[in-house]
Amino acid sequence: MTDPSVLSTPLCGLLGCRYPVLQAGMGGVARAELAAAVCGAGGYGFLGMVREPPQLIAREIDAVRARTDKPFGVNLIPAATDPDLFAEQLAVCFDKGVHALCFFWDVDAGAVARAKAAGCRVLYQVGSVEDARAAEAAGADAIIAQGFEAGGHVRGGVTSLVLLPQVVAAVSLPVVASGGFSSGESLVAALALGAQGIHCGTAFLATEESFAHDYHKQRVVAAGSGETVHTDAFAINWPPASPVRVIANSVTASLGPRLHGYKPEDFRREEVARDDGRPLYRFSTDSPLRTTTGELEALALYAGQVAGAVDRVVPAAGRVAQIVTAAHATLERLASRNGGKG
């Protein structure tokens, strides 16, 4: 059961990866070192280039290619990006011949059309059946169905266990499970629900190669599943009504029972940290990166409820290997219970 083909799905053929394990393109966190390590281990990595300048995107793409010859993608969010900047981001991705683009939030049919015309594969992350259908109609190649338990920005309000099979039934595209997936057992569960792979953020944030600050990584490792908070209070620098899931901290504690209903203009710009000379504010969407200094505890510590299952920081290749090894063991155990009949 150690044959890699046992876990191979059509998604692997679409993306050119060995295993159906996708690393989420977390903004700020998913840089070249992480994406290249995941790809080199047989998974599929994404650069998290949300609202980043084209020059940085070009540099990170080149840096991945200096580390691996495997295909990889870039994650962008049209709805949260100035239209002119987004056009520049697309242009550099097309110029560099990026293999795939992953989009998120509102379904932007025009962005899908431009990416497809440039020869990119397109994955669309959604939080509802309606958006999954819209992404398919727009021409996406695969759907990432994100459950409510996911970390970072959360699009919908339904858990993965409920959402995933509904999305699978609603579209004819490969569907990838996101939100609550970090292990081989969860990969097998996703496959059983009709998915063709898993999309992991929190599990890859807590790796040696991720660009997250070590403080953030250690908070993920220490957190239990009940220690995350779903709130839209981290609103500065982002469109209104964009909830996130973070590890509880002094900022979420200051909200009291009111976790939702906030807008960017509700908060004054109180600097609590800096990153590469840029001020970071309390209630902003910024998370602490390797280059961040200041009051790290007061920043958005993104993590999904699956943080309770992530107990140490490991190399990204080790995380992929753990998932694959456990998936094979799970399939073997299930087969033995069935008398070896598949």
Image: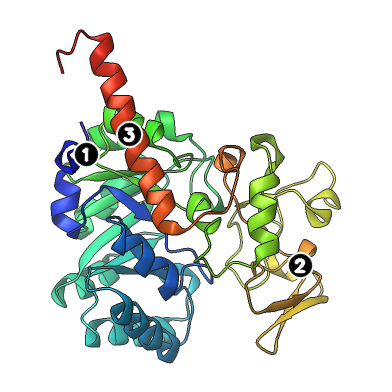
Label 3 sits on what residue type?
A: Ala
Contact between labelled residues 1 and 3, with CB atoms less than 8 Å apart: yes
Contact between labelled residues 2 and 1, with CB atoms less than 8 Å apart: no
Instruction: Residue 253: give x, y in percent of width and height.
Output: 84, 49
Say which residue appears at 27% left-offset and 54% top-offset.
135
Instruction: Residue 200: give x, y in percent of width and height.
Output: 43, 50
Say which residue appears at 25% left-offset and 13% top-offset.
336
Residue 19 against residue 36 in the figure, above or below: above
Q: CA distance from mark 3 to mark 1?
A: 8 Å
Relative placement, left or right, of 53 versus 69 is right
Say which residue appears at 81% left-offset and 57% top-offset.
251
Say which residue appears at 23% left-offset and 82% top-offset.
94
Whether residue 24 is visible here, answered yes or no, is: yes
Q: Which residue carries the number 2 mark?
A: 296
Q: Nearer the viewer, residue 188 or 88?
A: 188
Mark nearest the camera among 1 and 2 is 1
Q: Which mark is residue 7?
A: 1
Relative placement, left or right, of 247 versus 249 is left
Which element type, helix, strand or loop, lies under badge 1?
loop
Q: Earlier in the sequence, mark 2 or mark 3?
A: 2
Which element type, helix, strand or loop, lies under badge 3?
helix
Residue 184 against residue 98 in the figure, above or below: above
Whether residue 164 is visible here, answered yes or no, is: no
Q: Which residue carries the number 3 mark?
A: 327
Q: Earlier in the sequence, mark 3 or mark 1?
A: 1
Label 2 sits on what residue type?
A: Leu
Q: CA distance from mark 2 to mark 3?
A: 36 Å
Q: Quadrant of the N terminus?
A: top left
Estimate how packed mark 1 is, as few (under 14), some (14 to 19) or many (20 or more) residues with alpha carbons within 10 Å. many
Which element type, helix, strand or loop, lies under badge 2?
helix
Q: Earlier in the sequence, mark 1 or mark 2?
A: 1
